[in-house]
Image (cartoon, grey):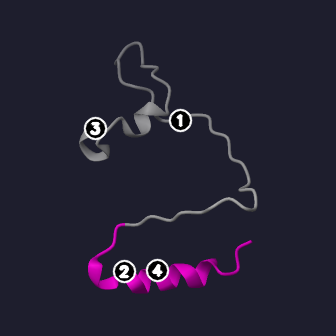
Amino acid sequence: GNAMAGKLGINALTPSAADPISKQPELKHAAIQVEKLAPGHALMAMRRITDTNAFSVLEALRTRMKDLP
């Protein structure tokens, strides 16, 4: 919701349909499309970390991603 996401969050991506009786939003499912990442596109990873382990997290990410195309 707005309190956690700061904006609309996932609600901006899901249908605005509501149950006709309870008036609760129908957020249980939504159609998506998944596509393979084409070579040459930049990849960005984000994670909340503490200042004390930022470099170790970066090194672990580099190690895991070195074999990706």
Which numbered disc flags the more N-terminal residue, 3 or 2? 3
Can you identify the residue that label 4 sits on? 58
Q: CA distance from mark 3 to mark 2?
A: 28 Å
Q: Secondary structure at mark 2?
A: helix
Q: CA distance from mark 4 to mark 2?
A: 6 Å
Q: Nearer the viewer, residue 29 or 34?
A: 34
Task: Report if residue 54 lies within the magenta region.
Answer: yes
User: Which corner quadrant holds the C terminus?
Assistant: bottom right
- Residue at the limit of the structure toward the left, as seen here: 3
Q: Position of residue 43 (x, y in %)?
A: 60, 63
Residue contact at pointers 1 and 4, CB within 8 angstroms: no
Q: Position of residue 50 (x, y in %)?
A: 28, 76
Quarter-of-image position of residue 38 = bottom right
Q: Residues within 10 Å of mark 2 (few under 14, many from 20)?
A: few
User: What count of labels does the image hold?
Assistant: 4
Task: Report if residue 42 lies within the magenta region.
Answer: no
Can you identify the residue that label 3 sits on? 2
Pair 3/4: label in front: 4
Q: CA distance from mark 1 to mark 4?
A: 34 Å
Residue contact at pointers 4 and 2, CB within 8 angstroms: yes
Q: Is residue 16 above or below residue 37?
A: above
Which amino acid, mark 1?
Answer: His
